Structure formats: C-alpha cells, structure tokens
Amino acid sequence: MKILWVSPFFLHPTDRGGQIRTLGTLKELHKRHEVHFCALNASSNTEGPQRAGEYSTRSFAVPHDPIPRASLRILPQLFQAIFSPIPLAVSRYHSTALERVIAERLAEERYDSVVCDFLACAPNFREMEPAVLFQHNVETTIWQRHAEQTSSSLRRRFFGLQARKMAAYEAQICRRSRFVIAVSDIDASRMRNDFSVTRVASVSTGVDVDSLAPPPHADPVSDLIFSGSMDWLPNIDAMEFFLKEIFPLVQQELPRTTLTIAGRAPDERVLRAAEGVAGVTVTGSVPDMRPYLWGSKVSIIPLRIGGGTRLKVYESMAAGVPIVSTTIGAEGLTYTPGRDLLIGDTPQQFAQQCVRMLRDADDRAAVAGNAMRLVRDNFSWAAVTQEFEAILQQNRL
C-alpha cells in the first residue's frame, strides 16, 4: 500500500506516549509499505524531520509553534475558546499550511490509505471521508474527568464547557471518517454508544519488548518511579494527587521511601507539590527512560484522569518493574489484577499496595515476571501492527 500519514507532530525526540505508539506502528508498516508522512513541526525541532526516514519513505514538515499552555500569550486563545465551536485542544493544531499540503498530496498522488493521526489533526483535512482516524484517546472522556476532579469552580466550568464542545466535535469527526481505530475495546465501545459511530475497531497498544528487557544488573535510581510527559494535565493531576494524599501514607510506613518523577517539561504545579518533600526527585527530560525504570522497585500510575491507554503500563511490564496503578491508569489494557499489576483507587489502597511491593522482594519479582510474560507473548509491535495493517487493507480507497 501507499499510505499518507498526517500527524500533529514529528516523532523525535520521542517523549510522549502518543509519539511512541505512532512510531512503533509506523516502523512496522514502513517495512512493507510506502509511507508519506506529513506533520506540523516546531521551529526548534531539527531532529524530527532528520529522523523521519526511519519510519517513512517521504516526509513533509510544516512549521508550526503552538503557544505553550503555561504562557500568558495563550490567554487570547482561551478567551476565543469560550465562543468557538471547536475545542481549544484541537484548534491550537490547525494550520492552513498543513491543510494545503494535505490537499496537494491527495491531488498529486494516488494513495491506498490516508491516516489522520489524533483528533487534533482533523481541522487540517478539508474532507474526513477518505481518512482513517487513529484515536489515541476518547478526548471527551479526558475533559469530563478534568471537570470532575478539579477543585476550582472556575476550572470546572471551563473544563465542562470544553468537554461539551469536544463531545460534539469528536462525534462529528468520528462519524465522518472512513473508519476509526481506537486503542482499546473500552474506547471503541464509548464511540459506538456516545457518538453513534458504527465503523470503529480497536487495536491494542504495543511495546518494544526487546529494547526494554532489563539488563542483568542496573544502577539503583529510586524506590518508586513515575514516568511520562509532565506538562500533560492528567500526569500533573496524578502527581499532585500522589504527593499530597498518597506519598505521606507510604512514608508513614516506610519513612525512607524515595520517588523519581521522570519526564519532559515538568509543570510548575508538579514542582510546587514536590518542593521540600523528602526523597522526591523531579528530573525533567531524560535522554533514555529505561535506566530509570530498571533502577526502580515499583512503577506507580496514580491517574484519575485520562482516556485511551497508558503506554507506560506495558513499558514498565516489559522493563520488569512491578506496577501499582489506579483502575483509570490501567484502563483499556489486558491484565489480571493482583497477578500482573496491583490496583489501588483510594489513597489508602494505593499506599498499601506500594508498601506491599516495597517490603516483599519475592512478591515484586512474581508480579514483574507475570507482567513480562504477558507483554512478550501478546503485545510486541510486530503483533499489534498486523491488526492495524488489516484494517487499512479493508478500508482502502
């Protein structure tokens, strides 16, 4: 097949879960198919376009610098978002230049398949009918959970407004798309029930099991590890929640417990929550997340907000690190609670599961071993991309 793949960003540096999922999928597809990759690209990013040949035959970079969410310059966009029918999380990735490039590619080339990667890319398509929409999350769910979890009445109103706009927009785009690929059965079911989408199927999240396999010996990093993009609102909420309500309970039982928060662009709220807390390290961006996983005893995923599936779950499993998660943190993934990972949905439950793992090395090894076998047997990128490829074949133009 000849595939046109359109994304809101290039895939290097690879520091977001969505990038990891797209990169793993495209590397496999590129082994057998011709891939033309179009994406927005920040002016400071030279690595992305330079490395696009690792997963595509041709690439087209469109300069685009969204205003950072933490910048005061975003205030006019926030004001406009109150009155615009398009939610802010989508409109900030609209580019007339990318819209023109997509139209030119479709006019000049005969593609067998067109992929709109992420809902955020949809405004750049003049028509969605030819495109398979790759939905990494049900975006509406994320905004609804933001509104439910925030303690600020002003934020609750804003998040609620954005959730309603997202629901209307997401439903429209999903129904107009040629087909929708979700990342879990739960997400696919939500789209059918909430958006009346009939052309939808799920493809499991994959993981690079070979590169994540733990070495015989690893330098110690910390007792607990949280990995992820630290400017993503669900991760920010998770760390505020953990540091304020869970970590003190863990340290009551095990006072010397250490925690590393590893991931790019830590938000000021995370830094404030971690400030002065004994045993906590916030790294910011790291060149390679694997040593941080290998050198930690337990991977924590205390998410209260989110949609789609968290790649950090399968990555931690493949790295041989036992996991304590909330139900939402592991939502949409295949696992047996208590066997492959531990679940705690209240601060007390989560803290108890962390203490259990930290106190018992044999217990940690058993849970980690079960999880490693699960991902190795079922969720390599080669295995899951075959499902993705079959859907594209069935929905050729």
Image (spheres, rainbow, N blue to C red):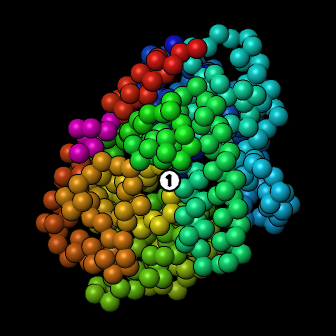
Q: Residue at x 75, y 48 (%)?
A: 86
Is 196 in the magenta? no
Q: Is residue 67 above or below residue 196?
A: below
Where residue 61 appears, x then y in whole percent? 72, 31
Q: Nearer the viewer, residue 141 or 3?
A: 141
Q: Residue at x 45, y 65 (%)?
A: 303
Q: Residue at x 51, y 19 (%)?
A: 395
| Quadrant hosting residue 275 | bottom right
Q: Is residue 82 above or below residue 130?
A: below
Q: Is residue 263 visible?
A: no
Q: Residues within 10 Å of mark 1 (few under 14, many from 20)?
A: many
Where residue 267 appears, x then y in whole percent? 62, 68
Q: Residue at x 47, y 79 (%)?
A: 243
Residue with the mark numbered 1: 307
Quadrant of the snapshot with the C terminus? top right
Where residue 277 appears, x then y in whole percent? 48, 84
| Quadrant hosting residue 158 | bottom right
Q: Is residue 262 left or right of residue 124?
A: left
Residue range highlighted in magenta: 374-380
Q: Is residue 323 above or below residue 105?
A: below
Q: Is residue 40 above or below residue 112?
A: below
What is the secondary structure assignment of the residue under circle 1?
Answer: loop
Is 375 in the magenta? yes
Where residue 93 appears, x then y in whole percent? 73, 44
Q: Report the magenta stretch's main SS.
A: helix
Q: Nearer the viewer, residue 312 or 212?
A: 312
Residue most toward the bottom? 252
**Disc 1 marks which amino acid?**
Gly
Q: Is residue 25 visible?
A: yes
